Amino acid sequence: MPRTITIAGNWKMNKTATEAAELAKGIVQNVGRQTEVSVVVCPPFTALQTVAGEIANSSVRLGAQNVSDKPSGAYTGEVSVAMLRDLHVTHVILGHSERREYYGETDAIVNRKTLVALENALIPIVCVGETLAQREAGEEFAVIGRQIRDGLAGISPAQFEKVIIAYEPVWAIGTGKTATPAQAQDVHAFIRKELAALQGAEQARKTRILYGGSMKPDNAAALLSEADIDGGLIGGAALKVADFTALVEAGRAAAASKA
Ligand code: PGA
């Protein structure tokens, strides 16, 4: 069985609920019927409910961009897994480099959130990736290996079936600089090897590894044709209906040629 190609839009801190409804409507119109590619949209918390309504009768799935590692209680400003589940959220982005850099998220925090998500039947999209300085120092594999081992520690084999990884080189996010398909493939193959060491070769073969970092309609086909690239986590290009549609179409073409 080939791995299902996943195209996920990370809307970051963009779109009011009203604007988000419009974007979601356009996406549903264009790709809300197809089922070859798993399509996920991740609006900000404030737009989850509206977007849930827009995508309700489509194949598009709903993701959040973060979640608390605590179940409930006195944690001002936090949002729990139960709150997300109640809005029909199925996926959650964890450990995005912006959370790591601006909000101090460590691998230990990412690990706690991943375990909480899995215990509550949310699919975590766990992000890993090196900074430019780390790549220039030749440390990318050491950094990513540590993020994988520490971020994904203690997950049972049954739960691991749900985990999605996103490789996002920090130097490629929002910069217009994309990793070349060969550079990305190298890291994806490395990640799959690390997953095999953690969870066994069979599970590693089944796990989806998405690429993120300036993925756009004009570079998606080349990236998605690589053996270990199973989809994309898309920021900027996910905010326009036409671009996101083109990315899903690139995913469908890749799915057909990998089948
Ligand atoms: P980008 O963002 O596509 O705008 O580079 C990707 C991400 O940060 O998930």
Image (tube, rainbow, N blue to C red):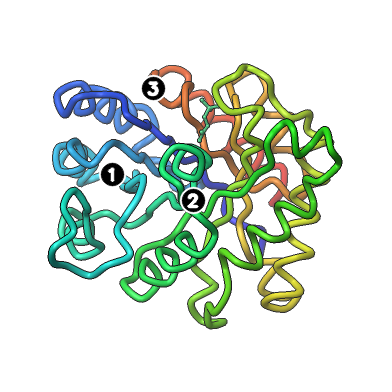
Label pair 3/1, CB-CB below 8 angstroms: no
Q: Secondary structure at mark 2?
A: loop
How many circles with numbers are drawn on the protein? 3
Q: Residue at x 14, y 24 (%)?
A: 18
**Residue 183, percent across and down?**
81, 36
**Residue 53, percent across and down?**
15, 41
How far apart are labels 3 and 1 at the CA level?
Answer: 19 Å
**Residue 27, percent across and down?**
34, 29
Q: Which mark is residue 239?
A: 3
Residue type highlighted by circle 3:
Leu
Residue type highlighted by circle 2:
Gly
Q: Residue at x 27, y 30 (%)?
A: 24
Q: Nearer the viewer, mark 2 or mark 3?
A: 2
Which of the two labelled residues, at mark 3 and mark 1, occupies the earlier sequence position? 1
Q: Which mark is residue 95?
A: 2
* Residue ID for mark 1: 58
